Image (cartoon, grey):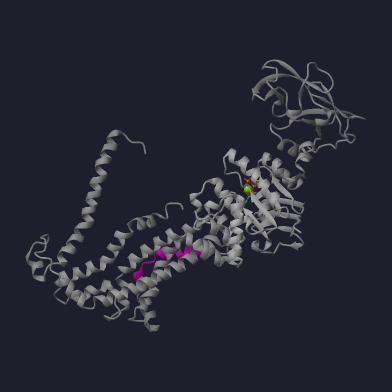
Amino acid sequence: MTKITLSGVNKSFGANFPVIRGVDLTIDDGEFCVFLGPSGCGKSTLLRMVAGLETAYTGQIQIGDRVVDKVEPADREVAMVFQNYALYPHMTVYDNMAFGLRQAKTAKDEIERRVKEAARILQIEPLLDRMPKALSGGQRQRVAIGRAIVRQPKVFLFDEPLSNLDAALRVHMRSEIATLHRNFPAASMIYVTHDQTEAMALADKIVLLHAGKDMLKHGSIAQVGKPLDLYHRPRNLFVAGFLGSPTMNFLEASFVAQEPAGARVVLKGGEEIVVPVDGSALASGAPVTLGVRPEHLAPVAAPGAQTLTRKVSAVEHFGEYSFVYLDGGTPAPLIAKVPGDGGVKAGDSATYQAPADCCHLFDADGLALNHI
Amino acid sequence: MASSPVARATGRVAVPVLGLFWLAVTTVPFLFMVMTSFKSQQESFSSSVWALPEALDLVNYNDVLSGPFLTYFKNSVMVVVISVLLIMLISSMAAFAFARMRFRFNEAIFGLIVAGMIVPIHITLVPIYLMTRQLGLYDSQFALIGPYVATSLPISVFILTEFMRQIPKELEEAARLDGCGPFAIFFKVFLPLSGPGLSTIAIYNGIMLWNEFIFAYVLTSSTGTRTLPLAIWDYQGQYTANIPAILTVVTLTSLPLVVAYAFGQEKIVKGMMAGSLKG
Ligand SMILES: Nc1ncnc2c1ncn2[C@@H]1O[C@H](COP(=O)(O)OP(=O)(O)OP(=O)(O)O)[C@@H](O)[C@H]1O
Ligand SMILES: [Mg+2]
């Protein structure tokens, strides 16, 4: 049983610098969980609390059936891969991987078996006698992962393990980490990143964390769920804006009335849009924010139902698709991501349709209204 | 630094000239010492100070080496080696605590220890002399080890603490996850990684203590316990001094350091620079 449970966890650095607020979270057996959030939101801190490297918090952390708040890091059956790898510079690759097992007084031939096995999985067998400084970034990364594997932990902890690699290698190592997860189905993994692509690609479950004022107001956790749930059903403006690239378009609007098909709102430009959400708690004329992702804005020939007509301010071509920048978003310009060259140029007036299913409506507090 | 062509040209000339000048300043006494050690007492008075010795006369060496020189040498080696090992052990453990452990008054205690650097050893002579007598250690080699270690600790702790502060925190954390307690972290990770810092303090203190005179003079009195810097005493009477013999002693005393430098030059320079360079 390697279920990990955090209950009512709070952490401050010093008396008045809260970093983590009110975290209640369960990570299931064998699940790949990603902590995602902007820089400084406390992802690393939360991970390090699970590792036992960060103490002095309130609340409770359980690994399996065991409350580990007072358990030493080494006895938690977790292994961690650090962002800067943290290989021991004075030991060979082999000794780096064997070190933890030697500390645990594992039999010598067992150590050798496990290190060789890990080296085989990670394809670093020819490097076993090298010193870390004679390795490339990617190789060091593999050794760091190898050091985690040999300990056969119940939980793997990764703190931005790919952020020091170049873009191509990052994609490659990402798929290797996914493979690693398949090879160790019993172990749970917690993976910290601020890169939403990594999170979407790897996660069974994403935990998106608030930073700063949002954290103080709503607690650390912005939303927990499967990657596509967060993408399709963001719970608030922060989640909606964080996931997706380019980021979701936001338009100021006011609520008109609740209809059977959803809430009817009117935009600043006068267009009326129906969003399939429950707005019955809203007063007529209440300010709301309409959200629609750039990739969901579809070009149409003429204005009609669910359409927006705006002046094109710029177009960026990427061959396969183009970004069309339109006047009138809040606070950033509206962007439509369209196939091919988009068929428009700066100065044109263009019309796009926002399919009802793909529209989101947020109340004045920034909370999403429930879809119906 | 931005510099004009003139300034650069001046620099190209001035730097080697200054270097040569300094080389002369440091080598001339050295040459004098070595040359004179091959002269007879007679010759050293009659010939010019800068005249080469008439013959490679080893009489002085024979003389010195058949005297108690080797006893002094043995004492020096013993005192310096034991002191330096103790200094390395104690200061590295203290440095680890100051650099990596959180406890009350950490900074205050560190400040106090470092402030020890400004205490002139001379004001400690009388109390140390009295303490040594009371401990019954007077006139033994062990009398020197205590004061040597104590007076060397402030600078050593200072250097090593700065050094250990540079070691990434993640290494310590990785070691904790690998099952190390504080002692294992110290001995298996921090100590091996402090190699350059340790060699800095070993070299620095080794040289200082090898040449240390005043404690040796005050705390020892007989031939069997004295160290090399006191050996010259044997060749100087109330009214005369056997200058060639004294310079032979000095030559022989500096020989181990010169040999060590010749073989370990690269390491020594690297060690001395360790504080300023990372990793
Ligand atoms: N030891 C510490 N003492 C004081 N403040 C700290 C300490 N460690 C972290 N913090 C602060 O806590 C906050 C959260 O830090 P944390 O490292 O967990 O952020 P993060 O989400 O991992 O950010 P990043 O993406 O930049 O790594 C930051 O504001 C940071 O400055
Ligand atoms: Mg971090």
Please tell me in which quadrant of the rendered image residue A149 appears: bottom right
Please tell me whether residue B114 belongs to the stretch shown in magenta: yes
Q: Can residue B266 be seen from the camera position used here?
A: yes
Number of numbered markers: 0
Image quarter for residue B206? bottom left
Is A325 a magenta residue? Answer: no
Q: Position of residue B135 (x, y in %)?
A: 40, 83
A200 horizontally vs B166: left or right: right
Span colored in magenta? B108-122
Residue A347 position, x and y percent, is: 68, 15
Question: Which residue is drawn at the image coordinates 71% and 29% (left, top)?
Answer: A331
Q: Is residue A336 above or below residue B170?
A: above
Q: Position of residue A332 (x, y in %)?
A: 69, 28
Front residue of A4/B202: it is A4
Judged by its main secondary structure, the magenta piece is helix
Residue at the extreme left: B46
Tell me if A292 is positioned left or right of A169 in this view.
right
> Quarter of the image containing the N terminus of chain B?
top left
Figure check: B244 above or below A286: below
Closest to the observer, A190 or A332:
A190
**Is residue B180 among what the camera can see?**
no
Residue B108 percent location from the top left of the image: 51, 63
Name the residue at the right extreme: A260
Establish if A161 lies above or below A272: below
Apparent side of residue A312 relative to residue B43 in the rendered image (left or right): right
Q: Is B67 rendered above or below residue B32?
A: below
- Residue at the spot 10% in from the left edge and 60% down from the top edge: B51
